Image: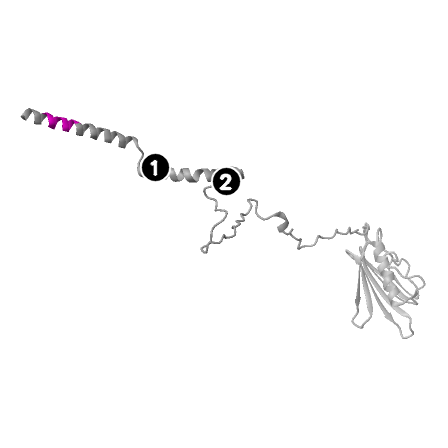
Amino acid sequence: MLNKKLLLWALGVIVFMVGATVAFNLAARSPSPVSAADGVAAASQGPAANEANAADGVSPDPGALPSSSTAADGSAAAPTKTDKPSAGGPSASAIEKPRLEVPASPKASVATLPKSVERAPAILGKAPKEGTANGKLTPGFPTSALPIPEGAHIVDSSVGTQKRNVQAAANYRTSMSPEKVLAFYESASAKQGWLATRGTAADGASNITIGYGKDTVVATVRTAATGATFVAVFGSFVVGE
């Protein structure tokens, strides 16, 4: 009787162990409930999304916004259009060309300098002869250095020398206007390559100074009571060799 009970107990243990082993093997081979559920959801959604992307010829973009959405009241909301700026910035037509604020400079005019005149001493060689005269020019008067207009009536004249320094003077009347007398000495200055400067004397008379370096001529022009033009000229020169 005892042996029979031991045999039954042993068979029960064996059956229990076999059943536990089979159950463990089945649990290891079958997927977990959560994984199985996720697989079913992916299988139900995957084909529809893949078919839509295949029809459009565009691969699915995980970050793209949905093309449409449903409003809270159930009506279909309008699709939202997203404008992305181009990589190159705004179009060329939107950019206004810059305008020049500074106008182009005009072409510079070409200035022509006057021809230079070789300046030489007004008196060359020997100093003129000293002397004085009334009603005429004294012999040796340096008219090349101290010019007198043609037709002038000489009142008096003089020449003085001291070594190489020469001083000459003359007073004369002329029918020329004061302006023409001044122009006469300006012309003589240009021929010599001298400088000419007009001025006014203390008594209101007009004067002109011409010369260059150590050679100088001053002519003072007045109008006499008779209407004639009275001129007093004085020159200081250095004889050149």
Residue displayed at 70% across by 54% down: 103
State if disc 2 and disc 1 touch (CB < 8 Å). no
Q: Position of residue 201 (x, y in %)?
A: 79, 69
> Is residue 12 a member of the stretch shown in magenta?
yes
Residue 36, position as x, y percentages in the image: 34, 37
Between 59 and 33, the residue placed more toward the observer is: 33
Q: Report the label total.
A: 2
Q: Quadrant of residue 5?
A: top left
Q: Horizontal placement of 108 versus 19: left or right?
A: right
For the residue marked with disc 1, what is the amino acid? Answer: Ala
The residue nearer to you, when weighing 240 against 38, is 38
Q: Which residues are magenta?
A: 7-14
Q: Which residue is mark 2?
A: 52
Judge by depth and name the residue closer to the eye, 157 or 203: 203
Q: From the viewer's perspective, is 204 left or right of 42?
A: right
Residue 197: image location, x then y, percent: 79, 62
Local crowd size for mark 2, using a 10 Å CA cut-off: few (<14), some (14–19), many (≥20): few
Query: Residue 22: where, in percent of width, then height?
Result: 23, 29
Q: Main secondary structure of the magenta part?
A: helix
Task: Mark yes or no: residue 202 visible.
Answer: yes
Q: Disc 1 to disc 2, how far (Cα)?
A: 25 Å
Image quadrant where residue 163 sits: bottom right
**SS class, disc 2:** helix
Residue most extreme to the left:
1
Q: Which residue is mark 1?
A: 36
For label 1, the SS is helix
Relative to 63, does residue 196 appear above or below in the rendering? below
Quarter in which the N terminus is drawn: top left
Q: Name the residue at 51% across, 37% down.
A: 54
Magenta includes 159? no
